[in-house]
Image (cartoon, helix red, strand yellow):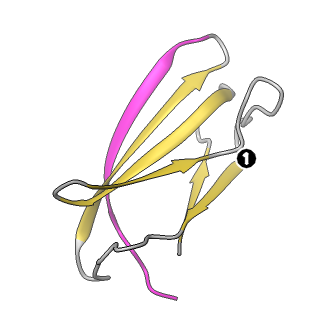
Amino acid sequence: MVELILKNISDRSFINLRATLILGEGELFNFDFNVSELYPLTPGMNAIADQTLIAGGFANTSLYTLVIYGTFEDGLGFKYVEQIQIALP
């Protein structure tokens, strides 16, 4: 299982937040966060999502692409791409 913790470091609230972890050719894993207009992610707060990676072969020494998509409370969307390393427990 992989757990993602994202922190809102902006000065605006998010009303939508999701992420896609790309492990390799065609290996995409989607993470949905419980963020909505009813439950916005306010500045300084964290959102957590987890996913069991079935057939997800990964190494804790490799970098993987994480694409984060979201929508601010004013409706403006964003996309952020980061290279991450998966830490084993």
Hey, what amino acid is under mark 1? Met
Q: Residue 23, relative to residue 74: is it above or below?
A: below
Residue 86: say if magenta: yes
Please report the residue visible at 57 percent of the width from the left and 52 percent of the height from the top. 6
Residue 52 image position (x, y, % from top left): 52, 70
- For the residue pair 15 and 56, the one nearer the viewer reads as 56
State whether the magenta stretch is mostly helix, strand or loop: strand
Name the quadrant containing residue 78: top left
The answer to whether residue 87 is left or right of residue 71 is: left
Q: Residue 40 location, x and y as percent? A: 75, 31
Asked where in the image residue 11 lies, by quadrant, the reply is top right
Residue at the image point whose x is 81% and y is 34% from the top: 39
- Name of the residue lying farthest toward the bottom: 89
- Most extreme residue toward the left is 25
Task: Please tell me which residue is depicted at 39% across the width and 31% down the height of the picture.
Answer: 79
Residue range of the region highlighted in magenta in the rendering: 75-89
According to the image, label 1 marks what residue?
A: 45
Residue 25 rendering spot, x and y as whole percentages: 16, 57
Outermost residue, right side: 38
10 Å neighbourhood of mark 1: few (<14), some, or many (≥20)? few
Q: Quick check: can you spot residue 11?
A: no
Figure check: 57 above or below 51: below
Residue 85: where, in percent of width, then height? 34, 70
| Badge 1 element | loop
In the rendered structure, the answer to whether residue 50 lies left or right of residue 13 reads: left
Is 23 placed left or right of 5 in the picture? left
Q: Is residue 79 visible?
A: yes
Question: Does residue 4 sit above or below 44 in this rendering?
Answer: below
Q: Residue at x 68, y 26 (%)?
A: 15
